[in-house]
């Protein structure tokens, strides 16, 4: 199982924003990555630009439904 959670470090304690739902005593492996707010904003803006540009799905347009069956 692999999940990603956000949290805040307080000394040796990490407070997660959401409950993880694991039983007490469950052994886990933690990988840390710091989040820079500017970096997150840049990523969000880049993803929005990609969505605004749209996806190339072949661009084959049909003017009438009957053309689909030729």
Image (spheres, grey):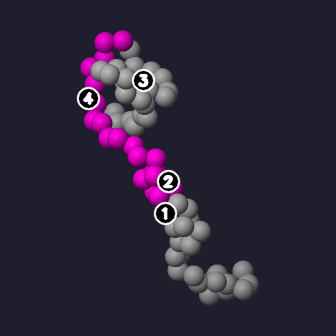
Badge 1 element: helix
Q: Identify which residue, 51 or 43, lies in the foreground.
A: 43
Check residue 33 for magenta coloring: yes
Stretch in magenta? 24-44
Q: Dot 3 corresponds to which residue?
A: 15
Residue most toward the right?
Answer: 64
Of labels 3 and 4, earlier in sequence is 3
Crowding around mark 4 (Cα neighbors within 10 Å: few <14, some 14 to 19, many 20+) is few
Numbered mark located on residue 29 in the image: 4
| Relative side of 12 to 40, left or right | left
Q: Nearer the viewer, mark 4 or mark 2?
A: 2
Q: Identify which residue, 20 or 64, lies in the foreground.
A: 20
Q: Nearer the viewer, mark 3 or mark 4?
A: 3
Q: Residue at x 53, y 75 (%)?
A: 57
Numbered mark located on residue 41 in the image: 2
Of labels 1 and 3, earlier in sequence is 3
Compared to 34, does 54 lie above or below?
A: below
Q: In terms of secondary structure, what is the magenta stretch mainly?
A: loop
Q: Residue at x 52, y 76 (%)?
A: 56
Crowding around mark 2 (Cα neighbors within 10 Å: few <14, some 14 to 19, many 20+) is few
Of labels 4 and 1, earlier in sequence is 4
Distance of label 4 from label 1 (alpha carbons): 31 Å
Residue most toward the top?
Answer: 24
Q: Nearer the viewer, mark 1 or mark 2?
A: 2
Circles 2 and 3 in contact, beta carbons < 8 Å:
no
Distance of label 1 from label 3 (alpha carbons): 29 Å
Distance of label 3 from label 4 (alpha carbons): 16 Å
Circles 4 and 2 in contact, beta carbons < 8 Å:
no
Compared to 6, does 37 lie above or below?
A: below
Circles 4 and 1 in contact, beta carbons < 8 Å:
no
Distance of label 4 from label 2 (alpha carbons): 28 Å
Q: Dot 1 corresponds to which residue?
A: 46
């Amino acid at each position: 199982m692999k999940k990603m959670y956000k949290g805040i470090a307080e000394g040796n304690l990490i407070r997660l924003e959401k409950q993880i739902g694991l039983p007490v005593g469950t052994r886990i492996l933690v990988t840390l990555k710091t989040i820079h707010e500017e970096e997150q904003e840049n990523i969000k803006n880049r993803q929005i630009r990609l969505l605004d540009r749209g996806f190339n799905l072949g661009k084959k347009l049909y003017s009438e439904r009957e053309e689909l069956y030729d």
